[in-house]
Amino acid sequence: MKLLSILFAIAACIGTTVAGNAQTQDPDAVNAGAPVTTLAPETADMTWIGKAVDDPDYYVWCTSPIQSDDGKIHLFCSRWPKKHGMGGWMTHSEIAHYVGKKPEGPFRFHDLAIPAKPDAPWLNSIHNPFIGKVGNKYLLLFISFDRRPGGDGKMLTALATAKSLNGPWKLEGDKGLMFKPSPDPKHWTYKAWAMDNPAFIADPVSGKYFIYFKASPQQRDSRYGYAVADKLEGPYTLSDAPCTDNKDYIEDANAFMIGKKYYLLTNDNYGTHTGKGGRGILWASDTPTDFKLADAKIGFLNTTDYAKNIDTSRASHLYGGAFKFERPGILMLAGKPAYFYGPSGVNLDGDDHTCSYVMKINFKADGGASKK
């Protein structure tokens, strides 16, 4: 199993080269003719605060926030020992639970929600957390590599539930696994290289539960689709087609609702849609099943657009060249986006590990949009 893990890690590195190349683009380069040019009013005004989670012994990455009934803020982050470098997300990632009294922090480590088991055929490296709540039950989505017979080492989505943010977390489905690529050659997920980067909406209109994920036979062609169920625990049925019409690679979706509107917030890695690599796309729709580029706006800018008064000369570039956000998490308070959390491959203090940053969203229900 050790040898299998090493071989797969090498293969995964090769498979992620395409997405990784987006990191090396000139952050000031503008892609002429990009279709999305307007800043979304929902997230147009964000105030830089600083670090949210900085754990000196770990690379901290995905950051998914939620507020508990007592008003505290809980962050579920993927992390791995820094000795493994950036590639450790493929072998040693775990989901850590941090708690703070305020959205701005400070945040302290509380417990380990889902541990890593590097040599396990399934539930090995645990990544891409998304925390949510339905009724009095919490849900935690994440991904792992399926190295079991027939799994082909694909990154697939898993679900765990709990009555408390402190756990214990119960794996749903097949030891957490909720769905696989369709065996139907005509289905859009057939031979998908992964079904990952999960997000979630409990639809108040239909009463159904939607798990969003990205998939495609080729990574660069990935689009978002969904799996839908009548119960949180499943079973989930795959959508017949993707629900986004992106022209190029996107990833790292966050899903939420404002009033009766449905939103997906994704990265625009190559800037094909928003003009600059590292910006985000805010997809808006009147339904949970169809998100059009024609209705999308710029969801967030490059990190340097917010940290304008920060001295970046001593920053350490641990992953990629551009100072950009990865897998953003949105804290919803009173039904509105209130805080934005995002890790970066750049540590502003020049330290030897990654951390997660936080900004306050000065929400505007309408107006405030501008061209960028």
Image (cartoon, helix red, strand yellow):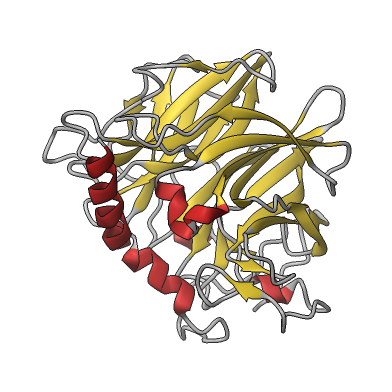
Q: Name the image quarter holding the C terminus.
A: bottom right
- Residue shown at 21% from the left, 51% from the top: 217
Tell me the residue at 46%/37% (across/down): 126
Q: Is residue 244 above or below residue 115?
A: below
Res 6 seen here:
yes
Residue visible at 34% across and 34% down in the picture:
119
User: Is residue 231 found left or right of 149 in the rendered image?
Assistant: right
Picture quarter containing residue 201?
A: top right
Horizontal side of 351 relative to 27 (left or right) equals right
Q: Residue at 57%, 36% (x, y): give it.
A: 95
**In the rendered image, which quarter is residue 352 located in?**
bottom right
- Res 34 visible: no
Query: Is residue 25 found left or right of 247 in the rendered image?
Result: right
Q: Whole-percent x and y of residue 115?
A: 52, 30
**Where is the N terminus found, in terms of image quarters?**
top left
Q: Position of residue 49 (x, y in %)?
A: 83, 60
Name above or below for residue 293 compared with residue 201: below
Closest to the observer: 340 or 210? Answer: 340
Q: Position of residue 292 (x, y in %)?
A: 45, 55
